[in-house]
Structure formats: structure tokens, C-alpha cells
Amino acid sequence: MNIELVLGYCAIIAVLLISPGPSVLLSINNGINYGKKIAAIGVLGNVFAFQILTLIGASGLGIALTTFTGTLIAIQLIGAGYLCYLGLKILSSPAIKLSAKGVKSTFKPSPWKIFRQAFLVTSLNPKALIFIIALLPQFITDSEKLTPQIAILCIISASIHFAIYFGYALLAENVAQISSSDLGRKVFDRLSGITFLIFGIGLASTNIAN
């Protein structure tokens, strides 16, 4: 792969990942509520899911999935339902109290649960798969072996993905340590839950078939 293709891919992936969305919101939420260590596990879930979507998009399976409208719609509805579930869960949960010294919570989530949540939020987004299927051919050179090219693109996207999402989580944790009022926490949780609901409803109402 030439350097122009690599730099172009870096730029497009960075713009895609830095844009606000459910996965970004989840990283911010984890950073505020649980701190950077737990949030990093969630980011790994996002990264792992995105790499699986990339491999699917690079294979014939990706194109096959997009030809079956019913499969895409099923993934879309499951993903929308999961986002709404997260939103309702956040709205119904008590606010986690923070202090200026750091994140303090009587509830300690399991790393696996945080990883699973992030993995599902990313993997159950059919728009991400469609985007990858449309993007990859633009950066694949037919005259070169496919496997090394896909490996390079996966390493690039994984590195950028982790850096951006962990950056969001780290910034969120620092903001939480500076402002730890109970009212601020309640307002954030309400806004976060409502935003997840909006994302879920928006995904459900999107016409994936077209």
C-alpha cells in the first residue's frame, strides 16, 4: 500500500470515529462513572467489534449480508432495541456519586459487562457495516495481496479507534473530578439516557434497505 492510501484511510477513519454517536456517548458515560481503567475495557469492546465488522466487510460475507434486506433490518431493530434498553437503564438507575479525589461508586461493574455493552453497541449498528463495505474497496490495491492490506487497515483503524475513544473517556473522567455535584450527575445521567433513547429511535426509523 502506498502512503497516500494509508493517510487517506487514517483521515476518513478519524473523522468517522470522532463524530458523536452511541459508542462515543458510552465511552464518555463510562469515563465519568467508572474512571479510565474501566472505560478502557469498554473501548476495547468497541475496537474489537469494529475489527470484526471490517473483516466481514472485506470478505464476501459482508456483501452477502447487505443483499439480504431482512437480515439488515433484523440487526437494525436489535441494535435499536439495545440502545433504548441502555437509555432506560441509565434513566432508572441512581446517579453515581463522585468526589474531587476521583470516581467513587458503591457499584463496581464487571469488566466483562462493560466490554460486552460496548461490543454490542458497535456490532449491532448495520450502518457501520454498510460504511465499511463501501469504504474498503477504495483503499485496496488489486495488484497486491489482500491479506496484508487488510491487516494494515485493521491495525490503523484499531489504533485510531482506541486513541479517540479513550481520549473521550479520559477527558470525561477529568471533567467529572472537577465538577462532582449531585445535581450535575443527575442532569448528565438524564441527558445521557435520553440521548441513548434518541439514538435507538433514530436507528429504528432509518431506512437501511436503501
Image (tube, rainbow, N blue to C red):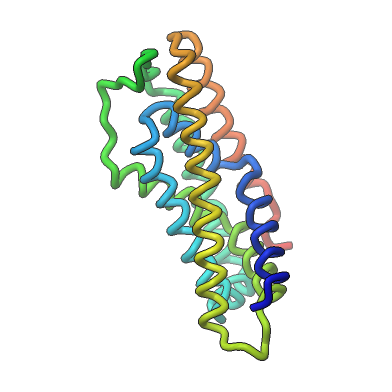
Residue 76 in which image quadrant: bottom right
Residue 55 spot, x, y in % from top left: 51, 72
Q: Residue at x 56, y 27 (%)?
A: 194
Asked if residue 153 lies left or right of residue 141, the reply is left
The percent coordinates of residue 20 (x first, y second) are: 63, 40
Asked if residue 95 lies left or right of residue 84, the reply is: left
Which residue occupies 68% across, 76% down?
2
Q: Relative to 153, is 178 above or below?
A: above
Q: Residue furthest bottom?
A: 143
Residue 93: % across, % down? 38, 23
Q: Nearer the viewer, residue 95 or 164?
A: 164
Name the residue: 43% across, 32% down. 31
Along the viewing direction, whichever of 174 and 17 lies nearer the viewer: 174
Q: Residue at x 68, y 50 (%)?
A: 15
Q: Position of residue 139 (x, y in %)?
A: 68, 74
Tell me the quarter of the image containing the N terminus.
bottom right
